[in-house]
Image (tube, rainbow, N blue to C red):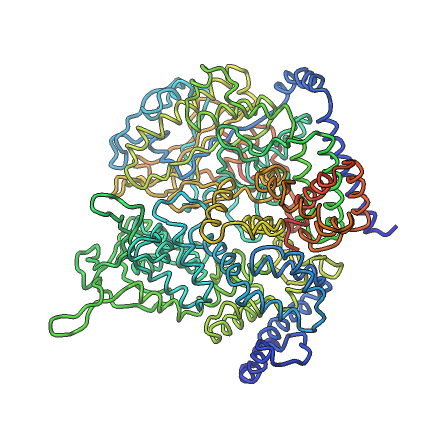
Amino acid sequence: MSISSRFVDGINRRHFMSHLAGAAALAAPATAFTNTLLANASDLRKRHKAAILLWMGGGPSTMDIWDLKPGAATGGPFQPISTSADGIQICEHMPLMAQQMHHMSLVRSMSTREADHMRGRYYMHTGYVPNPNVEHPSYGAVVAHELADQVPDLEIPPFVSVGGGSVGPGFLGMTWAPFVVDSNGNVRNLDMGIDPARLSQRLEMLTAIEGRFIGEKRGASAEDHAKVLDKTIRILKSEQMDAFKVMKEPTDVQEKYGNTGFGRGCLMARRLVEQGVPFVEVDLGGWDNHADIFKTLKDNKLPELDKAMSALVSDLAERSLLDDTAIIWMGEFSRTPNINGNGGRDHWARSWSVAVGGGGFKRGVVVGETSSDGKEVVTEPYSAQDLMASVLKSLDISLETTFTAKNGRPMKIANSGKVIKELFA
Amino acid sequence: MSTRLPCLRWPSLFLAMWCVVDGTLSSAADEHFGIPQVKFINESVAAGWSDARIKPSDEATDQEWCRRVHLDIIGRVPTVAELGVFVADTAPDKRAALVARLLGDDYVDEYARNWTDVWTTVLIGRSTENDNINRSGMRQWLRRAFAKNLPYDQFVTDLVTATGVNKAGEKGFNGATNFLTGKLEENGIQATAKTAQVFLGLQVQCTQCHNHPFNKGKQNQFWEFNAFFRQSRALRKFEGTREVQAIELVDEDWAGEGGNASQAELYYELRNGQMKVAYPVFVDGASVDPSGYLPAKMDDGTAFGVNRRRELAQLMVASPLLPKAAVNRIWGHFFGYGFTRPIDDLGEHNPPSHPELLDGLADQFRQQSFNVKELIRWITLSRAYALSSKVTKGNTSDDPAVGEKPKFTHFYLRQMRPEELYQSLLTATEADQADEKGEKASRKKDEWLSQFIIAFGTDEGDEATTFNGSIPQVLMMFNGDLVKTATGTGKGGFLDRVASADMSNAARIDTLYTAALARKPSRKEISMANQLMAARKGDAIGALQDIWWAVLNSNEFIINH
């Protein structure tokens, strides 16, 4: 037997076996399947670490939210209020979060250089500036890749993006791509509408075609396609897909999070983390406020954020999930301290804030400081890679981890960022 | 340096080319099809192979090449009949003949549809969220431009200088306006960034706020380029008091931010807060009359004023960057990778993989009056385009997917664009004949596409797609309405016709494979298909449905190879 035909057979057999396994799960009595899940659920909950990234697409003005400058010419109209954390003040239009700040910490000394949306989104998600020759994995792909072993029974994708503002898996491959859903948890086209036996016959035929093409060695994307097929088959009839159905929550819980896309997204994030998903990203866009920023923030963005985020933090704490679940709040950059002619603020990356909490983070502290007009970081500045290293540390992921990019080059996890030590006890 | 063009010898060689195109030269086509530009591509690419000591793959089969060239030129797989005719043809120049046919009158509608899809995405993206853009209007203009093979310099000029109403059916309609109607807010920052990026391969968006850290882009260049758009306004159209859903793009006298229209200037802020002034200056340093007045005559007949966008278009067309950016984009369309990555960044910090080939093709493109169809002919008849996608021991290292510069030693796999998949499913099931044509069909396709589009809601209209090989795409292929229709067993549908045709089961399976994959089933696949036939017992059409579903869901179908 030649090497190439052995290769073909190997691929065929592997895929064939996985399809059989999938088909068997479909055909198994539903009750037995569910019982196993229930038996494992409490163990799962204790064992696994997870992270929820609240992604503020467009670049929120952090000096109007987390680092107010009342009285400064750049300060804008909002006033600071005290919070449940000693010495931390935040915006008056975040009253619910103010009661949760003892669970959170602020880094007021972020200083980055990417003030273009696409570049900033990429940089903050990966810790690397865009490079035409290599695609870096985003937070979700890295965390899912490192933590997936903790949840061997997970059938749904380990990286879920609600709303879809995320960045892809880069050189880690499509297995770690974000599974994008809308905030209603609708996953399109899930219902096969044919009986499992017939489905597995179809899949057998498909496996033959798929394997033949892979065996012809035309490039990696042929095999990537097969891998995603396998993952899709796994979720088709998984009971775990229930985690996406936020409408199954009691009404009062739904109301607590708010009847908004972001509110439902945050509630879904909690359900997914409970189910074992290691990384969930929830997108809240609309922060690109070049004009009329203060009205937009006060009437629209901040109330939606405040309600959902505070509900998420308190809910995770009440369910004893917070110690194993890191929360990261950030956008691609912030906005200019100077208020422009249209009553807005433009893109600004030099001095800004992020919020983190849960996981292994120290809570209720403020790291760093900006100047009185908000234009400079006056303490040690931190970068995207420093933040990423800190988040990974809060999840007990080793910062010594090194990936190998597709071109064979070693890539240090989090781009060798330095842990922000004030965030750890 | 052996690849430098023998420029003086071109005229006589062109003569030979025209003969081939006219079909009057009956002798056997040589390996370059008698076309000097094809010879040039072949020699340049081959020089890169020997420099890197790697070997090209074998030639693709006729079937593979035929599928490829249909997908890339007209945006869909070949029909069973088209494939059959081509494979049976024994003429030595049959590939040149097929390319000529696909670029000719028989396929003009499909050619225009495909390139309209491609350019709609380039010019205005796939998201439908921007109210200032009328997608139908954009498409209508593009379809006409490609149907008549509008020379590329004219194409760019029309887009950059367009005035008129953006919606079809309204008085003064000019669909070309849609390139800019959605990009003029905030002083035309998007118009500036996109015009430079799409047509000149210059990434200037970062220099809006600061000098570029690692290329020559300077902040003043952004604002000097921006100054060309300051006479332009996108106005909401009213009819009496009724607002119609249309935008009119106009040029108006502009007083400048300093209030002196004869020296109409704008101001921008440096990172240190200092304000600077800018007038219209092109990227190569050429400046134009700083007047903000549109061209007019004084009472004594003296002409004054200037139309800044017209000046810009002229400077762009004269710029060597314009044909380079076009060649790079179109090469990238056919090979999956351009000479630079990304294809719309030709800055000095980003050297191309084949500089002489890019420059030479750009020169030829200009010399051939920016004839896009000729450029496509040269590329599709090149040896590199005809290579198999099977990687060999001699060229494993040539893998741009891992970040290497492309050497074009084999055809690189790439997934169909969603528009190609949509059209291919219609073609493979022969549903394109009965279906709506033109704008109505395009709107249906938009609706289907919208399930994959993620708009980021920024001022720049950034978007992403889940049609990227991820789970939602696989689910759509498993269960989506489009595939349900394609695999339907209803009376008169594709499977019904195959099932009731007078042919053997083996021939039926052959037909399905040929329609989707442009090949016959292997022995193993035949035996599996037969097992399915047996499993469905008397339900022959049900078995065909299972096979058809499997074929359409395969990597081989959705990957252009």
Q: Is residue A173 visible?
A: no
Residue at horizontal 18%, vertical 64%? B262
**Picture coordinates of residue A31, whole percent (x, y):** 69, 16
> For the N terminus of chain B, which image quadrant?
bottom right
Asked where in the image residue B127 lies, by quadrant, the reply is: top left
Indicate whether A200 appears above or below B126: above
Toward the left, the furthest residue is B299
**Picture coordinates of residue B133, whole percent (x, y):** 37, 49
> For the C terminus of chain B, which image quadrant?
bottom right
**Picture coordinates of residue A257, whole percent (x, y):** 44, 21
Indicate whether A135 appears above or below A307: below
Number of marks present in the image shown: 0
Indicate whether B265 appears above or below A101: below
Residue at horizontal 67%, vertical 29%? A149
Left or right position of A124 against B58: left
Left or right position of A424 against B87: left
Asked where in the image residue B279 lies, by quadrant, the reply is: bottom left
* Front-most of residues A271 and A232: A232
**Picture coordinates of residue B428, whole percent (x, y):** 63, 51
Left or right position of B348 against B9: left
Toward the right, the furthest residue is A1
* Front-most of residues B244 and A70: B244
Indicate whether B255 appears above or below B552: below
Residue at horizontal 70%, vertical 18%? A36
Q: Is residue A420 visible?
A: yes
* Front-most of residues A306 and B57: B57
* Front-most of residues B420 and A165: B420
